Image (tube, rainbow, N blue to C red):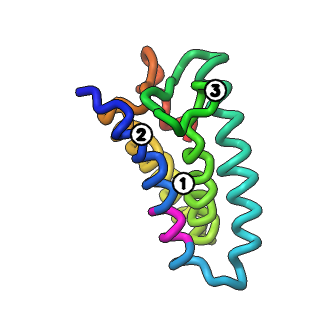
Amino acid sequence: MRLGFDNSIIFLLKAILFGIATAIAIPKKEYKKFFLWGLLFGGILDVIIIIMLGPILNLTKYQNMGIHGIFGILPFWTPIAWIFVLMLFFYFLPIHRYFLYLYVLGFAIFGYMVGIVLQNMDLYEYLGSYIYFAPITF
């Protein structure tokens, strides 16, 4: 089922929802510290990974981005959403090693499931057998 331009608003909604969750969960005193980590690992690193996995390695592809697309490579709102997601990730990061492993594994599965949902909405696509190895990237 192809939903096209109307569905490209999902990228904006994703950024807004994660932004609201971040504003609610992280205290204002600590927001700046976690924003810097989120910007580094969520925004900048996300763009680098998208470029590597998309145009360079041809393992993933964003599609039907509508007016939100940047050079046909990635949606504008995706790195912003990942900034908020990584802020939450680092804020709730557990101290104990056992819980840390479960937390990172759970986060990787969550990121993979978001990709599957976007693929089902015809907004993102795992190409070839990468669909089976994508959780390792997350």
Q: Assess whether mark 1 and mark 3 are in contact (beta carbons under 8 angstroms).
A: no
* Residue 118 horizontal/vertical position (percent): 38, 38
Give the mark, 1 or 2, whose residue is nearer the N terminus: 2
Say which quarter of the image contains residue 54.
top right
Please give the name of the residue rendered at 43% of the width and 55% of the height, measured from the top-left corner: 13
Marks 3 and 1: which is nearer the front? 3
The magenta segment is: 17-22
Which of the numbered marks, if any, corresponds to residue 104?
Answer: 1
Callout 3: SS: loop
**Position of the N terminus by quadrant:** top left
Distance (Cα) linking label 1 and label 2: 29 Å
Left or right for 128, reference 35? left
Q: Residue type at mark 3?
A: Phe
Judge by depth and name the residue closer to the eye, 33 or 2.
2
Which residue is labeled 2 in the image?
8
Callout 2: SS: helix
Give the mark, 3 or 2, whose residue is nearer the N terminus: 2
Give the mark, 3 or 1, whose residue is nearer the N terminus: 3
Say which quarter of the image contains residue 8.
top left
* Residue 104 horizontal/vertical position (percent): 54, 54
Which residue is labeled 3 in the image?
71
**Position of the C terminus by quadrant:** top right
Judge by depth and name the residue closer to the eye, 64 or 116.
64
76 versus 12 height, above or below: above
